[in-house]
Image: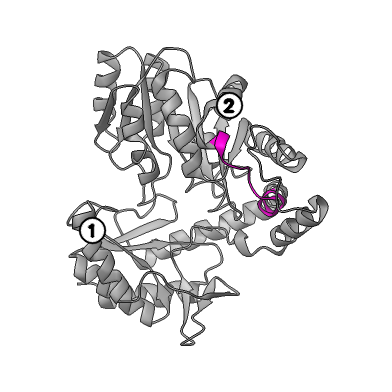
Amino acid sequence: MIRTSDPVWQGAADRGLIDIRADPQPGNAFIVRETGHEFLNMCSCSYLGLNFHPAIIEGAIQALREAGTTGPSISATRIRHNLLGRMEEDLSDLFGAHVLSALSCSVATAALLPLLASGQLVAGGPRVMVFDRNCHFNMNYVKPICADESLVLTCDHNDLDAVEDICRRYPSVAFVGDGVYSMGGAAALRGLLELQERYGMFLFLDDSHSLSIMGEHGEGFVRSQLEMNELTAIVGSLGKGFGTGGGVIMLGDRGMVSVLARHGGPLGWSQGMGISLIGATMASAAIHRTPELGELQRRLRANIDYFDELLPTPLAGNGLPVRRVTVGDTDRALQMSAELYERGFYNSAVFFPIVAKGDAGIRIMLRSDVSREQLSTLTGYIRELSP
């Protein structure tokens, strides 16, 4: 994978598309200090623009002042700052689940999946781990560790027939995938829930890309459509739509929290979230309980619909903020991204292994705080530059 992809990464570096050092400006813009080049960041996953919200920034500052420290500098398994405990209780109430925090979504995944594969997290013994082919790299990265504990299989994207066939062949199965996928689209959730009910299949879903943007309280695509149970775990990043940082694990069984806290690898040996992030997260949770959240969600949906009207793609109409324009050729994707950057819009070029070989293109992340004028200009440039 490295031999194939690194020359493309070098091509991106040669065109100035990675390792960009810039200062944030109001309205999700950035400026490169050395050259004065200004651009709009269309790769940001802060879909509601909450990472600029003054109440969230103030929440971080107030928490630091209250605590008088950046953090206790010890594993959260041994000592949890009262602010961290309050934050987890707050998020548990907000999302209607037992919530355990982590330094990142990747840490949460690395903690949970090996325990699930080994049969230590939930009854039923070691589980055959079925990974969706399109699941995020942070899940695929843990496959070798899971394979030390149980059989690891990969199914085609949203191939429910293949998943059901595996459930028929093996008595204890876990499905691993995204709720909303980072390259666009969503899990076939209804079918997965039917398989869970029929076969007792465990569902592990990373719903980072829908947290905050869906659900009455921003609980996300998956949580808003199911009741939590002992056979479901939802992992989400607070560093995207939620506007802060760190990760959360939503569980339906309180007993799993203790198992994870004590035996979940990096959850035990890593420190807890920093005080500033805890304060920012509690401030964001407060916003999630107000009508402002619904208004931000409506603005985002309006921008998604407007983009789809201006530039229809295969993902048009799904109501989700990730869009891809496929050009096929890797060099062409890099060149298009570079030309858009020069014109003031940063859109990431995506290529193998981010997407399959031959599917290179650009990815656009839509936000609530982008204007219609900016979207119109961007889509006009994309149409002009598309092959």
User: Are the residues at dot 1 and dot 2 in contact (C-beta closer than 8 Å)?
Assistant: no
Q: Secondary structure at mark 2?
A: helix
Q: What residue lies at 65% left-to-right and 37% top-to-bottom?
A: 76
Residue 103 spot, x, y in % from top left: 56, 45
**Residue 386 visible in the displayed image:** yes
Horizontal relation, residue 191 to residue 6: left or right: right
Above or below residue 11? Residue 66 is: above
In the picture of the structure, the residue carrying the numbered disc 1 is 5
Q: Is 47 inside the magenta-drawn segment?
A: no
Q: What residue lies at 28% left-to-right and 21% top-to-bottom?
A: 164
In the picture of the structure, the residue carrying the numbered disc 2 is 262
Q: What residue lies at 51% left-to-right and 62% top-to-bottom?
A: 367
State which tag comes first along the sequence, 1 or 2.
1
Bounds of the magenta segment? 267-281
Q: Quadrant of residue 52?
A: bottom right
Residue 122 spot, x, y in % from top left: 48, 17
Residue 315 spot, x, y in % from top left: 33, 53
Using the numbered discs, state the Cα–Cα distance from disc 1 to disc 2 in whole angstroms.
38 Å
* Foreground residue among 163 and 145: 145
Above or below residue 89? Residue 288 is: below
Q: What residue lies at 74% left-to-right and 56% top-to-bottom?
A: 59
Q: In terms of secondary structure, what is the magenta stretch mainly?
A: helix
Mark 2 residue type: Arg
